[in-house]
Amino acid sequence: MSEHVVWVVAGALVNGADACLMHRRPYEKHHGGLWEFPGGKVEDAEIPVKALVRELREELGIVVDPGDCEAVGFAEDAGEQSPFPIVILLYRIHQWQGEPRALEGGRIAWFARAEVAELDKPPLDRVLAAQLFEKLSP
Ligand SMILES: Nc1nc2c([nH]c(=O)n2[C@@H]2O[C@H](COP(=O)(O)OP(=O)(O)OP(=O)(O)O)[C@@H](O)[C@H]2O)c(=O)[nH]1
């Protein structure tokens, strides 16, 4: 059986010491109603960080410099909990241009670290959030 792996890039927009922007997926989509890091699928032959810059422009209307994206997390599921094999790369971003807006539906909001831990999230996002905040610890 050939398995098509879905590669996903996600961005943790961080404001100050603690606040992080999360996106609640539209209800009609896979993982609808759950809170995720903004981002999306890497297209064929696309370098991941450029896919992230593209996704954040499309989804939030912000401009991000690839040099401002720091890789901080990685999670994968071979298709055990997810309906398809998936790899997610998480980048932390401290600066961007523009005010983030939810341009593709769902909603966005800023959350403190403790609140992110409590949000309803897909399983891989629990792993990614733990990696992110480990890196943010003093
Ligand atoms: N963007 C994003 N996707 C995630 C995260 N965690 C996670 O399991 N996923 C899953 O990864 C997949 C990414 O799909 P997406 O829908 O965001 O990507 P996209 O906008 O490029 O695709 P589409 O246009 O087909 O909807 C979804 O199944 C989504 O639920 C996350 O933190 N961020």
Image (cartoon, rainbow, N blue to C red):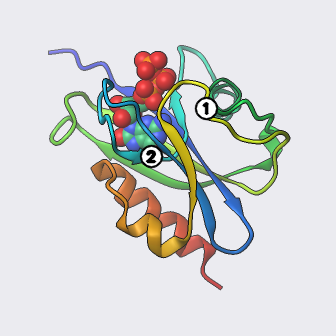
Left or right: 46 in relation to 95: left
Asked if residue 67 can be seen in this view, the reply is yes
Sequence-wise, which precedes: disc 1 or disc 2?
2
Image x and y of residue 129, in percent: 45, 62
Mark 1 or 2: in front is: 2
Q: Give whichever of 132, 28 is nearer the camera.
A: 28
Up-down relation of residue 24 to residue 132 (above or below): above
The quadrant of the picture showing ligand 1 is top left
User: CB of residue at label 2: within 8 Å of ligand 1?
Assistant: yes
- Density class for disc 2 (Cα within 10 Å; few <14, some 14-19, many ≥20) is many
Image x and y of residue 13, in percent: 66, 53
Residue 79 found in image quarter:
top left
- SS of the residue under disc 1: helix
Asked if residue 130 can be seen in this view, the reply is no
Q: Give whichever of 54, 105 is nearer the camera.
A: 105
In which quadrant of the rendered image does the C terminus lie? bottom right
Question: Which disc number belongs to residue 36?
Answer: 2
Residue 15 found in image quarter:
bottom right
> Which residue is at a point 45% across and 69% down the rendered structure image?
115
User: CB of residue at label 1: within 8 Å of ligand 1?
Assistant: no
Residues at marks 1 and 2, CA–CA distance in whole angstroms = 18 Å
> Which residue is at a point 54% across and 17% down the rendered structure image?
43
Q: Give whichever of 103, 52 is nearer the camera.
A: 103
In which quadrant of the rendered image does the N terminus lie? top left
Question: Which disc number belongs to residue 48?
Answer: 1
